[in-house]
Image (spheres, rainbow, N blue to C red):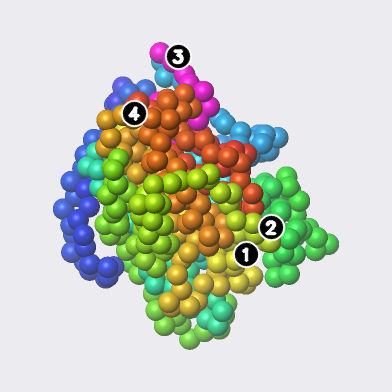
Amino acid sequence: MEAMAGPVLYQKLQVWETSLESEEEEEEISESLVSDPWGPSVASGNEAGGLPGTWARLAAALLLLALGFFLAVRQFQATGSSPGAVGSVAPPPSGHSHRPGVYHHGAIISPSAACSLLGQELLAAGGNVVDAGVGAALCLAVVHPHATGLGAMFWGLFHNGSTGDSIALTSGPVQALGPGLGLPAALPALLLLHTRLGRLPWSHLLTGPSMLAQGGFLVEAPLAGALAARGTKGLCPLLCHTDGTPLEPGARATNPKLAAVLHRAALTPRPDTAGEELLSLLTRDLRLQGPSARPTPTLALALQLPVPRGILFTTPGPSAGPELLTLLETALHSGGSGPVPCLPQTTVPPGSSILATVDSSGSVLLLTSSLNSSFGSGYLSPSTGILLSDLVAESATSAWACPVILRDNSDDTEVNVLGMVASGSPEVAGTVAQALSSHLAGPQTQTQHQHQQGATEMPSTCGQGALLQVAAHAEHAHVSSVPRDCCSFQGF
């Protein structure tokens, strides 16, 4: 008889040194947050348990292989739906359900239907919001190479619904791999986040993305639009037909070199060694002597700003988090909010990507990444299938990164936690600040609207950016986006 699924676990973090070279082990204190009594049994921690030795590895490999093929099939089935289409797993045994965007346990929202589906399946398999977010980010690295990838820089903001603490993820200082080419930092950054806060095995998170890269993924509208705007120079044969024309929406693409990188990354046990083989392949492609530096991702306490209704959390510099807090302080002191502005108009698709996950107990993960411009440097590594960014200035400010979380302590609202993250041009910090100040300025009106709609709905936006919003209140998880059809949300 199978054991019941255990509760989702998060590790209570201490502030540690930024260096990843330390061999010291830190004590981990786990806290119970969410229990799924009808979900499958999953061993807690990052190691698979159960069967001994070879049989355990064989059983795990077969299970993950089946999951990967299932994900690929589901992406093909989803091609006829709109970007904002919603899917769901079977409802709880009671049969109780809610409108789209409101879920009993957890939810995820991202620019890709396939990646939102993968995140949902990780949640339903007993994973937590970190598992779902990191898995979806790796999926986006495959299906949205114009905006993110293993060559991208990452910022993240995690809120622990049990302790009330918020932790910020940074890829470390911007560094150059070669002339005009950014040092890739995605793998060590995401592995560090998962190692400290994830629950499912690291290899489990890479199975779906590697299968999509190997077996083929469907070109979604955002990627096709970016290709049409930029052209295919340097991107063939990955994103081109045999005659050199760009792939259109619904066409099938494969990236076996990237699949091999992801497969090898699944065997990487530590963040400080993640990406070493990738760097070796890249330096060989570029005929470099070797990178002068290694990525140094960090996790640290988030910036905080007390407000009348609670506490705001965001990422530290050189992200746009400090600018966001300054804008919010100014707006709150002036006492006015005004209408929410549209996201800034851009002439080309933004080279950034966002996603958000939330559970009903108030744990939230916001992730934002960037190649700096659409398709980054435009250099496609022949040995890895990775597009490198053109983020090279050591003092560069990551103006595209401004995730923010509000832990609401007021008595006149049911909202426990509210998270927002935006993509687009560097002016998105102003958009997020305006949306939050509007939320804070009218608690009574907002409370009534949230009770009816589940999350703050904002006017339609212009430009090619997007704003994602997640919330936990009334023991439910809520997701929404602006514009509404920009992104796909899934939950259970």
Determine whether 327 is above or below 97 in the image: below
**What residue sits 21% from the left and 48% below the top?**
12
| Residue for badge 3 | 95
Residue 382 appearing in the image? no
Q: Which residue is mark 4?
A: 414
Q: Which secondary structure lies at badge 4?
A: loop
Q: Which residue is mark 2?
A: 226
User: Which part of the image, by quadrant, shows the N terminus?
Assistant: top left
Q: Nearer the viewer, mark 4 or mark 2?
A: 4
Identify the mark nearer the N-term, 4 or 3: 3
Residue 349 screen position, x and y as percent = 65, 58
**Of the image marks 4 and 2, the number of the one nearer the N terminus:** 2
Q: Quick check: marks 3 and 2 in contact, CB under 8 Å?
A: no
Is residue 447 shown to the viewer in this render?
yes
Q: Quadrant of residue 162?
A: top left
* Circle nearer the N terminus (3, 1): 3
3 and 1 marks in contact (CB < 8 Å): no
- Where does the magenta region start and end? 94-107
